Amino acid sequence: MASGDRQDGPGAFRQHLPDLSIPRFTTMQKQDAHEYARAFKESGVPPWLHGLYLHWRKLYQEPFKGITNDGRVRPDLFRLQDEGMPIEAIVSAAETLLSRLTPAEHARLAHHIDSPEWRTWSNPEFLLSDKGLRLDELAPETRDAALALLEATLSPEGYAKARAAMRINGFLGELVGAPRVMNDLSYNLALFGVPSATAPWGFSFYGHHLCLNVFLYRTQAVVSPWFTGAEPNLIDAGPHVGTRILYREEALGLQLMRSLTPELQRRAQVYKLLHDPAMPEGRWNHDDQRHLCGAYRDNRVVPYEGVPVSEVGDDQRTLVRAILAEYLLYLPSRARELRLAEAERWFAETYFCWIGGFGDDDAFYYRIQSPVIIVEFDHHSGVFLTNTEPAKFHVHTLLRTPNGGDYGMALRPLIPGVEQEYLWKGEKE
Protein backbone atom coordinates (compact mmCIF):
# COMPACT_ATOMS: atom_id res chain seq x y z
CA MET A 1 0.00 0.00 0.00
CA ALA A 2 1.45 3.40 -0.97
CA SER A 3 2.04 5.81 1.89
CA GLY A 4 -0.42 8.27 0.41
CA ASP A 5 -3.14 5.63 0.57
CA ARG A 6 -2.62 4.74 4.21
CA GLN A 7 -4.92 6.41 6.71
CA ASP A 8 -1.82 7.74 8.50
CA GLY A 9 0.05 8.69 5.32
CA PRO A 10 0.88 12.33 4.56
CA GLY A 11 -1.87 12.74 1.95
CA ALA A 12 -4.48 10.51 3.53
CA PHE A 13 -6.83 13.28 4.67
CA ARG A 14 -7.18 14.69 1.15
CA GLN A 15 -9.19 11.61 0.19
CA HIS A 16 -11.85 12.96 2.59
CA LEU A 17 -12.14 16.63 1.66
CA PRO A 18 -15.77 17.77 1.90
CA ASP A 19 -18.03 19.10 -0.84
CA LEU A 20 -17.97 22.84 -0.18
CA SER A 21 -21.08 23.42 -2.30
CA ILE A 22 -23.42 21.82 0.26
CA PRO A 23 -25.48 24.17 2.48
CA ARG A 24 -23.43 23.46 5.59
CA PHE A 25 -20.39 25.10 4.06
CA THR A 26 -22.00 27.72 1.83
CA THR A 27 -23.80 29.04 4.91
CA MET A 28 -20.74 28.83 7.14
CA GLN A 29 -18.64 30.70 4.59
CA LYS A 30 -20.96 33.72 4.83
CA GLN A 31 -20.90 33.94 8.64
CA ASP A 32 -18.53 35.32 11.21
CA ALA A 33 -17.93 33.43 14.46
CA HIS A 34 -20.76 35.16 16.33
CA GLU A 35 -23.32 34.66 13.56
CA TYR A 36 -22.26 31.04 13.26
CA ALA A 37 -22.69 30.39 16.99
CA ARG A 38 -25.99 32.26 17.16
CA ALA A 39 -27.43 30.29 14.25
CA PHE A 40 -26.41 27.03 15.91
CA LYS A 41 -28.01 27.93 19.24
CA GLU A 42 -31.23 29.16 17.61
CA SER A 43 -31.67 26.40 15.04
CA GLY A 44 -30.58 23.40 17.08
CA VAL A 45 -28.85 21.93 14.02
CA PRO A 46 -27.29 19.41 14.08
CA PRO A 47 -29.63 18.01 16.75
CA TRP A 48 -27.08 15.68 18.36
CA LEU A 49 -24.58 18.50 18.91
CA HIS A 50 -27.26 20.88 20.15
CA GLY A 51 -28.42 18.18 22.55
CA LEU A 52 -24.87 17.77 23.80
CA TYR A 53 -24.61 21.52 24.29
CA LEU A 54 -27.78 21.49 26.41
CA HIS A 55 -26.37 18.59 28.42
CA TRP A 56 -23.17 20.55 28.96
CA ARG A 57 -25.19 23.47 30.32
CA LYS A 58 -26.91 21.10 32.73
CA LEU A 59 -23.55 19.74 33.92
CA TYR A 60 -22.40 23.32 34.46
CA GLN A 61 -25.06 23.78 37.13
CA GLU A 62 -23.36 21.17 39.34
CA PRO A 63 -21.01 22.42 42.06
CA PHE A 64 -17.42 21.61 41.20
CA LYS A 65 -16.16 18.38 42.70
CA GLY A 66 -13.52 17.03 40.36
CA ILE A 67 -13.10 13.84 38.37
CA THR A 68 -12.79 10.71 40.51
CA ASN A 69 -12.48 6.99 39.93
CA ASP A 70 -15.22 6.05 42.42
CA GLY A 71 -17.21 9.21 43.20
CA ARG A 72 -15.15 10.14 46.27
CA VAL A 73 -12.56 12.93 46.20
CA ARG A 74 -9.35 11.77 47.82
CA PRO A 75 -7.86 14.44 50.11
CA ASP A 76 -4.29 15.56 50.65
CA LEU A 77 -2.93 14.58 47.23
CA PHE A 78 -1.59 18.00 46.25
CA ARG A 79 0.61 20.56 48.01
CA LEU A 80 2.01 24.02 47.54
CA GLN A 81 5.59 23.94 46.25
CA ASP A 82 8.20 25.91 44.36
CA GLU A 83 8.04 24.76 40.75
CA GLY A 84 10.31 27.41 39.32
CA MET A 85 7.64 29.14 37.26
CA PRO A 86 8.97 32.49 35.90
CA ILE A 87 6.17 34.33 37.65
CA GLU A 88 7.67 37.83 37.34
CA ALA A 89 7.93 37.47 33.57
CA ILE A 90 4.40 36.06 33.38
CA VAL A 91 3.00 38.93 35.47
CA SER A 92 4.90 41.45 33.36
CA ALA A 93 3.42 39.98 30.18
CA ALA A 94 -0.08 40.10 31.69
CA GLU A 95 0.37 43.71 32.79
CA THR A 96 1.59 44.67 29.32
CA LEU A 97 -1.55 43.15 27.86
CA LEU A 98 -3.78 44.98 30.35
CA SER A 99 -2.07 48.28 29.56
CA ARG A 100 -3.09 47.96 25.91
CA LEU A 101 -6.78 47.30 26.50
CA THR A 102 -9.63 49.73 26.17
CA PRO A 103 -11.95 49.94 29.21
CA ALA A 104 -14.51 47.84 27.34
CA GLU A 105 -11.92 45.19 26.50
CA HIS A 106 -10.70 45.10 30.10
CA ALA A 107 -14.26 44.58 31.33
CA ARG A 108 -14.72 41.64 28.96
CA LEU A 109 -11.36 40.07 29.81
CA ALA A 110 -11.42 40.25 33.60
CA HIS A 111 -13.24 37.77 35.86
CA HIS A 112 -13.10 37.03 39.57
CA ILE A 113 -10.54 34.38 40.54
CA ASP A 114 -13.38 32.09 41.69
CA SER A 115 -15.68 32.72 38.73
CA PRO A 116 -17.47 29.58 37.54
CA GLU A 117 -16.70 30.80 34.02
CA TRP A 118 -13.42 28.89 34.35
CA ARG A 119 -15.51 25.83 33.54
CA THR A 120 -17.11 27.06 30.32
CA TRP A 121 -14.25 26.25 27.94
CA SER A 122 -15.06 23.96 25.02
CA ASN A 123 -13.18 22.62 22.02
CA PRO A 124 -15.66 22.74 19.08
CA GLU A 125 -15.40 25.57 16.56
CA PHE A 126 -18.77 26.88 17.83
CA LEU A 127 -18.24 29.91 20.07
CA LEU A 128 -20.50 28.46 22.76
CA SER A 129 -19.07 30.58 25.58
CA ASP A 130 -18.14 34.01 24.32
CA LYS A 131 -16.17 35.31 27.27
CA GLY A 132 -12.93 37.27 27.34
CA LEU A 133 -11.31 38.58 24.19
CA ARG A 134 -11.14 36.83 20.82
CA LEU A 135 -7.69 37.26 19.34
CA ASP A 136 -8.75 37.76 15.73
CA GLU A 137 -10.89 40.73 16.81
CA LEU A 138 -8.07 42.58 18.58
CA ALA A 139 -5.68 45.24 17.35
CA PRO A 140 -2.38 43.62 16.28
CA GLU A 141 -0.36 44.96 19.22
CA THR A 142 -3.01 43.76 21.68
CA ARG A 143 -3.18 40.36 20.05
CA ASP A 144 0.62 40.07 20.17
CA ALA A 145 0.54 40.93 23.87
CA ALA A 146 -2.01 38.16 24.48
CA LEU A 147 0.22 35.66 22.70
CA ALA A 148 3.20 36.94 24.68
CA LEU A 149 1.37 36.04 27.89
CA LEU A 150 0.88 32.52 26.62
CA GLU A 151 4.53 32.32 25.54
CA ALA A 152 5.80 33.59 28.90
CA THR A 153 3.76 30.96 30.75
CA LEU A 154 4.39 27.81 28.72
CA SER A 155 7.61 25.98 28.00
CA PRO A 156 9.20 26.89 24.64
CA GLU A 157 8.22 23.51 23.23
CA GLY A 158 4.75 23.78 24.77
CA TYR A 159 4.22 27.18 23.20
CA ALA A 160 5.39 25.84 19.84
CA LYS A 161 2.87 23.00 20.15
CA ALA A 162 0.05 25.42 20.98
CA ARG A 163 0.89 27.67 18.03
CA ALA A 164 1.10 24.61 15.76
CA ALA A 165 -2.42 23.58 16.86
CA MET A 166 -3.63 27.11 16.10
CA ARG A 167 -2.00 27.12 12.65
CA ILE A 168 -3.51 23.73 11.84
CA ASN A 169 -6.90 25.17 12.78
CA GLY A 170 -6.24 28.01 10.37
CA PHE A 171 -5.33 25.46 7.69
CA LEU A 172 -8.63 23.65 8.27
CA GLY A 173 -10.48 26.96 7.99
CA GLU A 174 -8.88 27.51 4.59
CA LEU A 175 -9.70 23.94 3.49
CA VAL A 176 -13.41 24.49 4.17
CA GLY A 177 -13.46 28.12 2.99
CA ALA A 178 -14.50 29.56 6.37
CA PRO A 179 -11.54 31.48 7.79
CA ARG A 180 -13.75 33.90 9.73
CA VAL A 181 -14.96 31.01 11.87
CA MET A 182 -11.70 29.03 12.02
CA ASN A 183 -8.30 30.63 11.72
CA ASP A 184 -5.01 30.62 13.59
CA LEU A 185 -6.27 33.40 15.88
CA SER A 186 -9.87 32.26 16.47
CA TYR A 187 -9.24 31.78 20.19
CA ASN A 188 -10.56 33.48 23.31
CA LEU A 189 -8.54 34.62 26.31
CA ALA A 190 -10.19 35.19 29.70
CA LEU A 191 -8.36 36.42 32.80
CA PHE A 192 -9.24 35.27 36.32
CA GLY A 193 -8.05 37.37 39.25
CA VAL A 194 -5.41 40.07 39.18
CA PRO A 195 -1.93 39.23 37.85
CA SER A 196 0.36 38.93 40.87
CA ALA A 197 3.66 37.35 41.90
CA THR A 198 2.26 36.58 45.36
CA ALA A 199 -1.51 35.97 45.01
CA PRO A 200 -3.41 33.35 42.97
CA TRP A 201 -4.69 34.18 39.50
CA GLY A 202 -4.83 32.58 36.07
CA PHE A 203 -6.31 32.53 32.62
CA SER A 204 -8.19 30.39 30.12
CA PHE A 205 -7.18 30.26 26.47
CA TYR A 206 -9.60 28.28 24.34
CA GLY A 207 -10.98 27.66 20.87
CA HIS A 208 -11.24 24.91 18.29
CA HIS A 209 -8.87 22.06 19.16
CA LEU A 210 -6.88 24.03 21.75
CA CYS A 211 -8.04 24.78 25.29
CA LEU A 212 -5.60 25.64 28.09
CA ASN A 213 -6.63 26.47 31.66
CA VAL A 214 -3.76 27.94 33.68
CA PHE A 215 -3.83 28.56 37.44
CA LEU A 216 -0.83 30.39 38.93
CA TYR A 217 0.28 30.92 42.50
CA ARG A 218 3.77 32.28 43.15
CA THR A 219 6.14 29.91 41.33
CA GLN A 220 3.60 27.09 40.98
CA ALA A 221 1.28 26.38 38.06
CA VAL A 222 -1.56 24.03 37.23
CA VAL A 223 -2.15 23.69 33.48
CA SER A 224 -5.30 21.59 33.70
CA PRO A 225 -7.67 20.79 32.20
CA TRP A 226 -6.26 21.10 28.73
CA PHE A 227 -7.43 19.81 25.36
CA THR A 228 -5.40 19.64 22.13
CA GLY A 229 -6.59 18.23 18.83
CA ALA A 230 -6.12 18.46 15.08
CA GLU A 231 -8.13 17.69 11.93
CA PRO A 232 -5.99 17.02 9.97
CA ASN A 233 -2.88 16.77 12.15
CA LEU A 234 -0.55 17.80 9.31
CA ILE A 235 -0.31 20.91 7.15
CA ASP A 236 0.72 19.75 3.68
CA ALA A 237 0.60 23.07 1.79
CA GLY A 238 1.07 26.79 2.33
CA PRO A 239 3.44 28.86 4.48
CA HIS A 240 3.37 26.42 7.42
CA VAL A 241 3.79 23.24 5.37
CA GLY A 242 5.18 20.38 7.45
CA THR A 243 3.55 21.50 10.70
CA ARG A 244 2.44 18.35 12.53
CA ILE A 245 1.36 17.58 16.08
CA LEU A 246 0.24 14.68 18.31
CA TYR A 247 2.27 12.06 16.46
CA ARG A 248 4.56 11.34 19.41
CA GLU A 249 1.62 10.68 21.71
CA GLU A 250 0.29 8.29 19.06
CA ALA A 251 3.59 6.49 18.47
CA LEU A 252 4.45 6.11 22.16
CA GLY A 253 1.00 4.78 23.03
CA LEU A 254 1.14 2.23 20.21
CA GLN A 255 4.65 1.21 21.23
CA LEU A 256 3.50 0.66 24.80
CA MET A 257 0.50 -1.46 23.78
CA ARG A 258 2.57 -3.56 21.39
CA SER A 259 5.30 -4.13 23.99
CA LEU A 260 2.91 -5.79 26.45
CA THR A 261 2.65 -9.55 26.71
CA PRO A 262 -0.37 -11.09 24.96
CA GLU A 263 -2.03 -11.61 28.34
CA LEU A 264 -1.54 -7.97 29.37
CA GLN A 265 -2.70 -6.81 25.94
CA ARG A 266 -5.89 -8.81 26.40
CA ARG A 267 -6.52 -7.16 29.77
CA ALA A 268 -5.59 -3.67 28.57
CA GLN A 269 -7.92 -3.85 25.54
CA VAL A 270 -11.24 -3.09 27.22
CA TYR A 271 -13.09 -2.94 23.87
CA LYS A 272 -11.95 -4.39 20.56
CA LEU A 273 -13.88 -1.91 18.41
CA LEU A 274 -13.81 1.86 18.62
CA HIS A 275 -17.61 1.97 18.61
CA ASP A 276 -18.17 -1.40 20.17
CA PRO A 277 -21.67 -2.87 20.63
CA ALA A 278 -20.50 -4.05 24.04
CA MET A 279 -20.12 -0.47 25.24
CA PRO A 280 -22.76 0.61 27.78
CA GLU A 281 -25.03 3.53 26.96
CA GLY A 282 -23.15 6.82 27.23
CA ARG A 283 -19.69 5.29 26.77
CA TRP A 284 -19.58 6.79 23.24
CA ASN A 285 -21.07 10.01 21.89
CA HIS A 286 -20.80 11.94 18.63
CA ASP A 287 -18.62 14.75 20.00
CA ASP A 288 -16.33 13.18 22.59
CA GLN A 289 -16.52 9.73 20.96
CA ARG A 290 -14.40 7.68 23.40
CA HIS A 291 -13.18 10.58 25.54
CA LEU A 292 -14.49 10.60 29.10
CA CYS A 293 -12.91 13.76 30.50
CA GLY A 294 -13.67 16.45 27.93
CA ALA A 295 -15.40 19.80 28.19
CA TYR A 296 -17.91 20.18 31.05
CA ARG A 297 -17.01 16.73 32.47
CA ASP A 298 -15.50 18.26 35.60
CA ASN A 299 -17.26 15.85 37.97
CA ARG A 300 -17.28 12.63 35.97
CA VAL A 301 -16.70 9.28 37.69
CA VAL A 302 -14.14 7.39 35.58
CA PRO A 303 -13.46 3.91 37.00
CA TYR A 304 -10.02 2.44 36.55
CA GLU A 305 -9.78 0.10 33.55
CA GLY A 306 -7.12 -2.04 31.97
CA VAL A 307 -3.73 -3.02 33.34
CA PRO A 308 -2.01 -1.64 36.46
CA VAL A 309 1.36 -0.11 35.58
CA SER A 310 2.74 -1.97 38.61
CA GLU A 311 2.33 -5.22 36.63
CA VAL A 312 4.29 -4.21 33.53
CA GLY A 313 8.05 -4.38 33.05
CA ASP A 314 10.69 -1.70 33.35
CA ASP A 315 10.68 -1.00 29.61
CA GLN A 316 6.91 -0.45 29.68
CA ARG A 317 7.14 1.85 32.69
CA THR A 318 9.75 3.86 30.79
CA LEU A 319 7.22 4.25 27.97
CA VAL A 320 4.53 5.35 30.46
CA ARG A 321 6.92 8.03 31.71
CA ALA A 322 7.62 9.13 28.13
CA ILE A 323 3.90 9.43 27.37
CA LEU A 324 3.23 11.44 30.52
CA ALA A 325 6.21 13.69 29.79
CA GLU A 326 4.73 14.41 26.37
CA TYR A 327 1.38 15.29 27.94
CA LEU A 328 3.11 17.56 30.47
CA LEU A 329 4.94 19.41 27.70
CA TYR A 330 3.05 22.67 28.23
CA LEU A 331 4.72 23.09 31.63
CA PRO A 332 8.19 24.65 31.86
CA SER A 333 10.92 22.09 32.53
CA ARG A 334 11.17 22.34 36.34
CA ALA A 335 7.41 22.17 36.85
CA ARG A 336 7.20 19.32 34.34
CA GLU A 337 9.88 17.32 36.17
CA LEU A 338 8.10 17.73 39.50
CA ARG A 339 4.74 16.76 38.05
CA LEU A 340 6.23 13.72 36.33
CA ALA A 341 7.91 12.63 39.57
CA GLU A 342 4.58 13.02 41.34
CA ALA A 343 2.91 10.81 38.73
CA GLU A 344 5.64 8.18 39.11
CA ARG A 345 5.05 8.01 42.87
CA TRP A 346 1.56 6.76 42.04
CA PHE A 347 2.58 4.06 39.56
CA ALA A 348 1.28 1.44 42.00
CA GLU A 349 -2.19 2.88 41.36
CA THR A 350 -1.84 3.86 37.70
CA TYR A 351 -3.82 2.09 34.98
CA PHE A 352 -3.37 1.81 31.21
CA CYS A 353 -6.31 0.88 29.00
CA TRP A 354 -6.87 0.58 25.25
CA ILE A 355 -9.79 0.55 22.81
CA GLY A 356 -9.48 -0.66 19.22
CA GLY A 357 -6.82 -2.60 17.38
CA PHE A 358 -3.09 -2.02 17.42
CA GLY A 359 -2.00 -2.89 13.90
CA ASP A 360 -0.24 -0.45 11.59
CA ASP A 361 -3.48 0.91 10.13
CA ASP A 362 -5.69 0.73 13.21
CA ALA A 363 -7.14 3.84 14.80
CA PHE A 364 -7.31 3.61 18.58
CA TYR A 365 -7.96 5.14 21.99
CA TYR A 366 -5.88 4.88 25.16
CA ARG A 367 -5.95 6.30 28.66
CA ILE A 368 -3.45 6.47 31.51
CA GLN A 369 -5.11 7.20 34.85
CA SER A 370 -3.99 7.60 38.45
CA PRO A 371 -5.14 9.60 41.49
CA VAL A 372 -3.09 12.61 40.29
CA ILE A 373 -3.26 12.56 36.48
CA ILE A 374 -5.46 11.39 33.61
CA VAL A 375 -4.41 11.56 29.97
CA GLU A 376 -6.52 10.44 27.01
CA PHE A 377 -5.73 9.91 23.34
CA ASP A 378 -8.40 9.28 20.69
CA HIS A 379 -8.53 8.97 16.92
CA HIS A 380 -11.79 10.46 15.63
CA SER A 381 -14.09 10.22 12.68
CA GLY A 382 -14.48 13.29 10.53
CA VAL A 383 -16.16 16.48 11.66
CA PHE A 384 -15.17 18.62 8.69
CA LEU A 385 -13.50 15.85 6.72
CA THR A 386 -15.77 13.09 5.46
CA ASN A 387 -14.27 9.94 6.99
CA THR A 388 -17.10 8.15 8.78
CA GLU A 389 -14.71 5.94 10.72
CA PRO A 390 -11.95 7.15 13.06
CA ALA A 391 -8.72 7.93 11.24
CA LYS A 392 -5.20 8.75 12.33
CA PHE A 393 -5.31 12.23 10.80
CA HIS A 394 -7.98 13.42 13.27
CA VAL A 395 -6.69 13.30 16.84
CA HIS A 396 -8.01 14.46 20.22
CA THR A 397 -5.89 14.52 23.37
CA LEU A 398 -6.49 15.88 26.85
CA LEU A 399 -5.13 16.02 30.37
CA ARG A 400 -7.04 16.25 33.65
CA THR A 401 -5.93 16.48 37.26
CA PRO A 402 -8.45 14.33 39.16
CA ASN A 403 -9.59 14.56 42.76
CA GLY A 404 -10.25 18.28 42.56
CA GLY A 405 -6.91 19.23 41.02
CA ASP A 406 -8.29 20.89 37.87
CA TYR A 407 -8.19 24.71 37.78
CA GLY A 408 -5.88 24.58 40.84
CA MET A 409 -8.92 23.93 42.98
CA ALA A 410 -7.21 21.50 45.36
CA LEU A 411 -4.48 24.08 46.03
CA ARG A 412 -6.76 27.03 46.75
CA PRO A 413 -7.69 26.13 50.34
CA LEU A 414 -3.98 25.69 51.10
CA ILE A 415 -3.12 29.28 50.17
CA PRO A 416 -2.83 31.52 53.27
CA GLY A 417 -5.28 34.39 53.43
CA VAL A 418 -7.43 33.19 50.54
CA GLU A 419 -11.13 32.66 51.11
CA GLN A 420 -11.89 28.99 50.89
CA GLU A 421 -14.98 29.29 48.70
CA TYR A 422 -13.60 26.81 46.26
CA LEU A 423 -16.68 24.71 45.49
CA TRP A 424 -18.25 26.60 42.61
CA LYS A 425 -21.83 26.42 41.59
CA GLY A 426 -22.61 27.17 37.99
CA GLU A 427 -24.61 30.22 37.03
CA LYS A 428 -27.48 30.15 34.58
CA GLU A 429 -27.09 31.99 31.32
Image: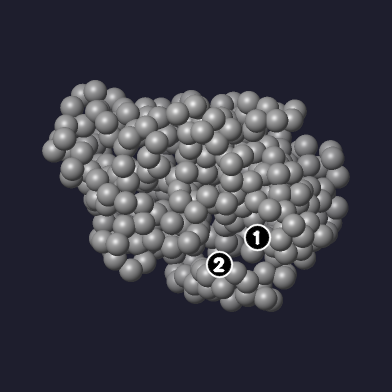
Could you tell me which residue is drawn at 26 percent across and 56 percent down?
303
Image coords of residue 71 (percent x, y): 28, 63
Image coords of residue 23 (percent x, y): 72, 64
Image coords of residue 106 (percent x, y): 78, 55
Q: Nearer the viewer, residue 180 or 63?
A: 180
In the picture, measured across the screen, residue 61 lies left or right of residue 321, that is right
Could you tell me which residue is drawn at 54 percent across and 60 percent down?
119
**Which residue, given by chain and number where applicable, does mark 1 sit on?**
126
Q: Taking 196 as reference, is 83 above or below it?
A: above
Residue 267 at least partly seen: yes
Measure the C-alpha gap from mark 2 to mark 1: 10 Å
Q: Which amino acid type is shown beneath numbered disc 2?
A: Leu
Q: Taking 108 as reference, is 245 above or below it?
A: above
**Which residue, given by chain and number where applicable, does mark 2 sit on?**
49
Colour convention of the picture: one colour
In the picture, measured across the screen, residue 399 lies left or right of residue 10, that is left
Is there a contact, CB below 8 Å, between mark 2 and mark 1?
yes
Could you tell me which residue is drawn at 70 percent across and 30 percent down?
237
Q: Nearer the viewer, residue 250 or 425?
A: 250
Number of callouts in the render?
2
Could you tell me which residue is drawn at 49 percent across and 72 percent down?
55
Residue 347, by quadrant, is top left
